[in-house]
Image (cartoon, rainbow, N blue to C red):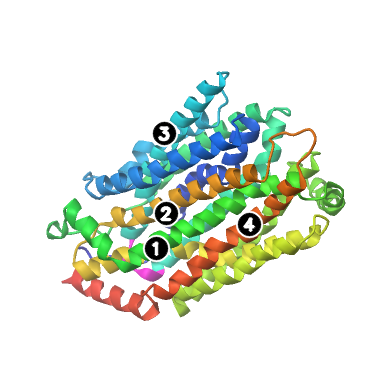
Amino acid sequence: MKSISKKLSITEKIGYSLGDLAANLVFQTLMTYLAYFYTDIYGLQADDATALMFIVGTIAAFGFNPIVGAIADRTKSKWGKFRPWILWTAVPLGVISVLAFTTPDFSYKGKVLYAVVTYTLLLLLYASSNLPYSALSGVITGNMKERNSISSFRFVAVMFAQFFVQVFMLPIIIYAGEGDKAVGIEIVMTWLAIIGTILLLITFFTTKERVIPKKEQESTLREDFADLISNKPWVIMLILTTLTFISLAMKGGSYVYYFENFIDVSYLTNFISPILEFLSSVGINFFGNDPVSAGFGLFNAGGIIFMIIGIGFSKPLADKYGKRNVFGWFLFISTLFILLFYFLKPTSIAFIFGAQILHGFFYGITIPLLWAMIADVADFSEWKNNRRATAIIFSAMMVGLKLGLTVGSSLVTQILSSYGYVANSELGQSSEVVLGTKLLVSVYPSIPFLMGVALLFFYEINKSMESQIELDLKQRRNN
């Protein structure tokens, strides 16, 4: 294996990060709007939307990701193992992203079937693009500090995608469709698909694979899966990723319902009016005249801006204290601010925005570390077994991501349905629905986060082990 501890150029780090910007134009839309799209725009009943998201998502998590990981690890081309997948899937992923958020004029059964087919293809192509993309971070460099740096670049790009989707997308959907959300979301997704395709192509042309296993390190599928099962850090990261994305999907998918059904609109209008007037004075008029969509966008904006600030603290803290310790402590602190939402009233607008900002800052510190820890697990497996199967190990992240998204999104519609939610009700929602909405952004998403914090006590790759693994592998590669 080649020695590959060199410092990476800014161009390559930015080029790599653009791939996650593209992926998150899709992923953040799924996490924020999928449940809302199916129930309030597409027109599915909540129980049908729940079943669709859960069944298709579970099949995708446990079926698509391990298969793609195994194939990617065995891909041989002049471009490497993982980069060609980014090239091959760029256009198809863009096309299916549009089709999945299109509302055809079919019967109800026809719409259910269309949703099943398009959502299945979307998750298959997303896995085929994003899993090799994620594995690429493990072979760009063997230097763990450079990986921390790559992760920081990458997740600043993620935050930009999240910022657009969660801040501007709903107002733009309403504006583009002239009040018709079905038309608006199709127009917006078309433009996002074009932009995402271009960004993925830039990632392909600006990156390089450097960690290249020797022929004698190649392994069979049986050996790969045996290594995974015996790799305790991998098992922990699989569970941790699943728990993390259950929380993210649950609270992310609930905020739009929270603003429509819980927040006091008159207090919200009074609170955001000065902000909107200031933004309008400097030429920013994205939010329109709907206080709910404007408040929703500004609420998300505050959290994301402070997430980006938090990301800036991630690398120096991880370099000094280790990824595991930093991730665990700041995930715990950020969860406290999610729990705070339970105690806030519909009129406590300033406190609601403040809790979101503080949660965003502390959670932002953890964001780059999850993916960097997976790259460390790939190194741990090579260090322990003298075999490297990067993509199959990164499939843990993708299985956890998809499963977390599936469970979290399904819980949103299932919990709302259990409290009696009626989509587009002209009579408003019951007090039970209002309570359920509050619990969905506070208590329920806090539980998986706290379970993840507890799980980290059993994760053995601490700061000293990180250094030992990097040193030993460097010596082996040089020899």
| Label 3: few (<14), some (14–19) or many (≥20) C-alpha neighbours in 10 Å | many
Q: Is residue 303 left or right of residue 323?
A: right
Prevailing SS of the magenta stretch: loop
Dot placed on the residue nearer the N-terminal end, 4 or 3: 3
Provide the secondary structure element on which disc 4 rests: helix
Provide the secondary structure element on which disc 3 rests: helix
For the residue pair 223 and 468, the one nearer the viewer reads as 223
Q: Which residue is label 1 attached to?
A: 237
Residue 477 % position (x, y): 20, 68
In which image quadrant can residue 218 be found?
bottom left
Q: Nearer the viewer, mark 2 or mark 4?
A: 2
The answer to whether residue 286 is above or below residue 319 is above
Q: Which mark is residue 304?
A: 4
**Which segment is the magenta one?**
141-145
Query: Looking at the image, do the residues carrying marks 2 and 4 touch, with CB atoms under 8 Å apart?
Result: no
* Residue 340 at least partly seen: yes
166 magenta-colored: no
Dot placed on the residue nearer the N-terminal end, 1 or 3: 3
Q: Which amino acid type corresponds to the residue marked 2 in the rendered image?
A: Gly
Q: Nearer the viewer, mark 3 or mark 2?
A: 2
Q: Which residue is label 2 attached to?
A: 400
Residue 384 % position (x, y): 22, 70
Dot placed on the residue nearer the N-terminal end, 2 or 1: 1
**3D distance between C-alphas at marks 1 and 4:** 25 Å
Q: Nearer the viewer, mark 4 or mark 3?
A: 3
Provide the secondary structure element on which disc 2 rests: helix
Query: Looking at the image, do the residues carrying marks 2 and 1 touch, with CB atoms under 8 Å apart?
Result: yes
